[in-house]
Image (spheres, rainbow, N blue to C red):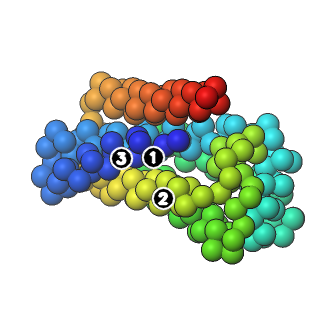
Amino acid sequence: MITGPLLVIASLLLFASPPQVGPMVMWTALLTGPFVGMVLLLAGVVKLGNRREFSQTIQNYKLVSPHAAGIIAVALPELEIIVGSFLLIRFSVVFAGTVACVLFVSFATAVGINLVRGRRRFACGCFGPSENKPLGWSHVVQNVSLAFVSLLSACYAWVIPPSQALWRDQLAATLAAAVILISWWLVTLSSHLLRSTL
């Protein structure tokens, strides 16, 4: 779902040069945080009302005990919402970006372990228990890419502290991140609907 937007942001990162704080670096720094923040917010919100089902999804990975799965099902959505909100409003970006990186690396590791074990016939649960797409290496790629973008958002916060960015630039970058994410979601939804009608 989010591979396309990640490629767009990755292309910006490749052409950005952190030592020289020019317009490209400024916009890349402002764009990465809100984008990852929106992904985490969406993932956290959709899990809030389905904690029992989400706990079962976690148990499907066979990596933690049922009791630990229940604790994770309670804590993870709140953590995703908090970290996502911090990134969205560029508050404590270094901390939030680092935590987001750790989360995505953990998700990629959990999926990768199950794929290596040959266990892929259950939903990943990235966006709640209602998601029915089975595990695949695309989930690993997406999570690793998000971890990379999260880490870079934290690194860019050292180069450009939030106080140095105009609120208009921050708002424009947040809207741009929203447009990228929503546009790709609409494209993905349209392709799914098209395949279902054929």
Q: Quadrant of residue 81?
A: top right
**Label 3 packing within 10 angstroms: few (<14), some (14-19), many (20+):** few
Badge 2 is on which residue?
Answer: 141
Picture coordinates of residue 92, whole percent (x, y): 44, 49
Residue at figure coordinates x 84%, y 55% from the top left: 56
Q: Quadrant of residue 132?
A: top right
Picture coordinates of residue 7, whole percent (x, y): 36, 47
Specify which label sits upstream in the sequence, 2 or 1.
1
Residue at figure coordinates x 23%, y 41% from the top left: 26
Residue at figure coordinates x 27%, y 48% from the top left: 11
Residue at figure coordinates x 79%, y 49% from the top left: 54
Give yes or no for contact between labels 2 and 1 (Cβ–Cβ under 8 Å). yes
The amino acid marked with disc number 1 is Thr
**Nearer to us in this view, 129 or 157:** 129
SS at circle 1: helix
**Nearer to us in this view, 65 or 10:** 10
SS at circle 3: helix
Q: Image height check: is 86 above or below 170?
A: below
Q: Quadrant of residue 23?
A: top left
Left or right: where does residue 19 sit relative to residue 169? left
**Marks 2 and 3, how far apart in space?**
11 Å
SS at circle 2: helix
Badge 3 is on which residue?
Answer: 7
